Image: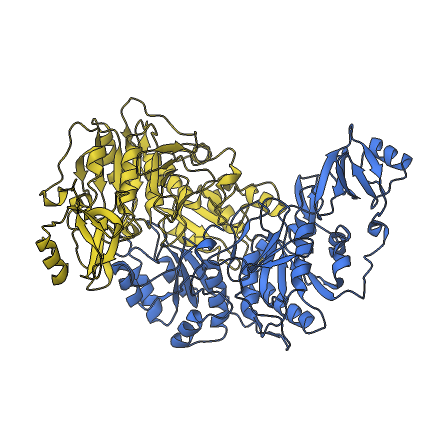
Chain colours: A yellow, B blue
Amino acid sequence: MYENYSLAIQKFLKKGKIEIGDRISVNEYEGVLMPKSAGDPDILVLKLDNGYNIGIAFKGVKIKKLKGEERIFKAKKPEFDKTKPPVAIIATGGTISSKIDYSTGGVRALTEPSELLYNIPELFHIANVTGIVRPFTKMSEDMNYADWQTLAEIIAKELNKDNKGVIVTHGTDTLHYTSAALSFMLKNLTKPVILVGAQRSTDRGSSDAGMNLICSVHVALSNIAEVGICMHGTMNDDYCIFSRGTKVRKMHSTRRDAFRPMNELPLAKIWPSGNIEITNENFKKRSEGKVIADTKFEEKVALLKVYPGSEPSVMDYFVKKGYKGFILEATALGHVPVSAKKSWIPAIKSTIESGIPVIITTQSLYGRVDPFVYSNLRILAATGAIFAEDMLPETAYVKLGWVLGHAKKPEEIKKMMLTNIAGEITERIDPRAFLY
Amino acid sequence: MYENYSLAIQKFLKKGKIEIGDRISVNEYEGVLMPKSAGDPDILVLKLDNGYNIGIAFKGVKIKKLKGEERIFKAKKPEFDKTKPPVAIIATGGTISSKIDYSTGGVRALTEPSELLYNIPELFHIANVTGIVRPFTKMSEDMNYADWQTLAEIIAKELNKDNKGVIVTHGTDTLHYTSAALSFMLKNLTKPVILVGAQRSTDRGSSDAGMNLICSVHVALSNIAEVGICMHGTMNDDYCIFSRGTKVRKMHSTRRDAFRPMNELPLAKIWPSGNIEITNENFKKRSEGKVIADTKFEEKVALLKVYPGSEPSVMDYFVKKGYKGFILEATALGHVPVSAKKSWIPAIKSTIESGIPVIITTQSLYGRVDPFVYSNLRILAATGAIFAEDMLPETAYVKLGWVLGHAKKPEEIKKMMLTNIAGEITERIDPRAFLY
């Protein structure tokens, strides 16, 4: 029951008839006493009403048992409230499904996805979180297009049941690659699909898993029928933001507000209370109709960064390995070296002449590429390279894989790449979106 | 005299005895009437007192000749004020040395660097801009390490004269690669070195060249003995920011405030008036002593982005081509695929075993890599890969080239890569630096 708490704490709790899951106050804090998987045994873990866990040193604190306790921890499994709207959760691994392994100081995967939900009883007050599907358990850096295909199939299946929306818990490293892939693969989308991760494992006092999941459930019940990522909007636990799956990027290695919308505002701000503020009206509304998983994908696409002294001959290497397409992360407006010792123009030209598309994106990340401003750009454009507007390099990479799964002719590929399919191209960039 | 202005404007100006360089008011605007190189002939170009050019349609405006006119445009060359402190300008090309070529709609290089200075008479009121050196004229996407070496040599020479500082005008695409290179190459730096570019060519109404240059001259006279980039701090023409050369990145393809400090605050905000607000005290102060150009550089370094489905075998390609080092732009904390179908671990391991360093940086750009948090990271760290703290991928790329020019033994290379040489590693990241 009190496993991993110190003997002093265990003794105190037993004496006060306080059990895990009871509502207590610790000095000025009120919340639910949490189970402890590991860590400093003298730190009490308390879940606050905002869904946030805090750790408080036991020594010298005043603890009081309160009414209105949460008994979810005593249940063998979450109690589903069938009067609430149904939402499916698909658990794939990552920090949000991990806890700290104090033997290594690192993080390991939870044994059961339900372990995660036990920690966030609020979820069951909002929605009937019925289907907890676990197609695989992977850290996101180990996922690839085949996992995106698996996910798209499962999500479509769950969306075509009576679920109001689907939530995917996922590692954060490549979360935005997956969100882009699902944006293209889920056709005729009529309900919300929310990808959510955590930057702190669920048993850490500062875990963002709880609030991110609570906000995600609110989005799942909302009117926003888009694929997107729902995570902290700021460093504080005030609100989450829901950003379009094709216009979002992990912009910080550790911060809880690392996922930022790129070149457009987030679609919405979501408070754990359920308040949703639409910040960008450009989204598909919830509607009726069968969602289709259209997952054909060409995996042989390379994403190359271009920089001073970069080696254009690497394109030939990929072509010889049977690669079918390239995304270049060029500089600023889409430049590659032209008059430099190692010009990229011959390699790009011969690649395109052999029928392989070359897409130009910008390593500046914000803003748009443009084939007309400078003469070097016009030389590049003359090779037939496709300037991908304001598409993120990562989104362009995923999109080209998906497009090549559907089209073979250069003209057809170009047309699809320059057609806005899932919000990946923004006609007019809101100036407030820069460094949002 | 009135070349490229419409006949109606020419007639009006002649009648009112208004010449290019005269101070005039146009409706509510006051400023100096500018020469016009090309563009809509019915648009008057006016330089405001903040150094900013605006274009105003001639039709229906009220124009008045004022006192206090600038006659610099009538001079054959700038008049140097020898009582002012000397500053050297090195002109290398780029938008800041370009004007619009209306035959193509694009931009072409100015014939003479002094053309640039003619447009900004304020410069000569602040400093004695004596040495205008033009080592080469290149757009920055065509520059490489050899150009960085040339620049470092010339800058050291100018700094070792009685100049108070050196300004380098430069294209913006790879400006931050050059600033990183000069940061490592200029040893025992005792004076400011300011890299400056423009996002709009000098003859465009919205050109940022003037204000950026004026602010750069103020930095050149300041106490900040660092290599850095001085450009617009906001979308408005209020102030510039000076960001450390190793901690700055072009984060937007077109905005005038595209250059942002990464993982630290800018060193200073600079107003065109000359007001300087230090925003980050962590800089070397101006001092005495000879600056040394230490430019040895190994060009065979590859910068590779790692992403879902990325191809680790490309490392072997570079090794076979004689490459001597790798920077990986990994995900978030420094992850590469480990258990995926295409694991990067074998390629990294064999590369390191053959004595070639592999440096881990993050494509999140903000934040730090860390070899300890997750088991996949520990597997990567066990190969001997070097986790480069919060170093930008671009800075790490330039640094490794410079380090390999100076060290051959793996232990020596590792030590240099993890030693803070030019502010490239930040011990504690100011939270305000995220998305600054």
Is residue B278 visible to us here? yes
Position above or below: A140 against A39: above
Which residue of the protein is positioned furthest toward the top in this rendering? A288
Residue B88 in the image: state x and y as whole percent: 71, 65
Position of residue A135 relative to residue B316, above or below, is above
Q: Residue at x 46, y 67 (%)?
A: B400
The mark tally for this picture is 0
Q: Nearer the viewer, residue A137 or A310?
A: A137
Q: Position of residue B201 (x, y in %)?
A: 67, 46
Q: Is residue B342 left or right of residue B193?
A: left
The residue lying toward the viewer, choosing from B149 and B318, is B149
Q: Tell me if residue A298 can be seen.
A: no
In the picture, the quarter occupied by the N terminus of chain B is top right
Quadrant of residue B330 in the image? bottom left
In-image side of A171 versus A390 (left or right): left
Q: Position of residue B409 (x, y in %)?
A: 41, 77
Residue A274 falls in which quadrant of the image? top left
In this view, the residue in front, B414 or B302, is: B414
The front one of A164 and B65 is B65
Above or below, B307 relative to A284:
below
Image position, residue A284 (x, y; %): 38, 27
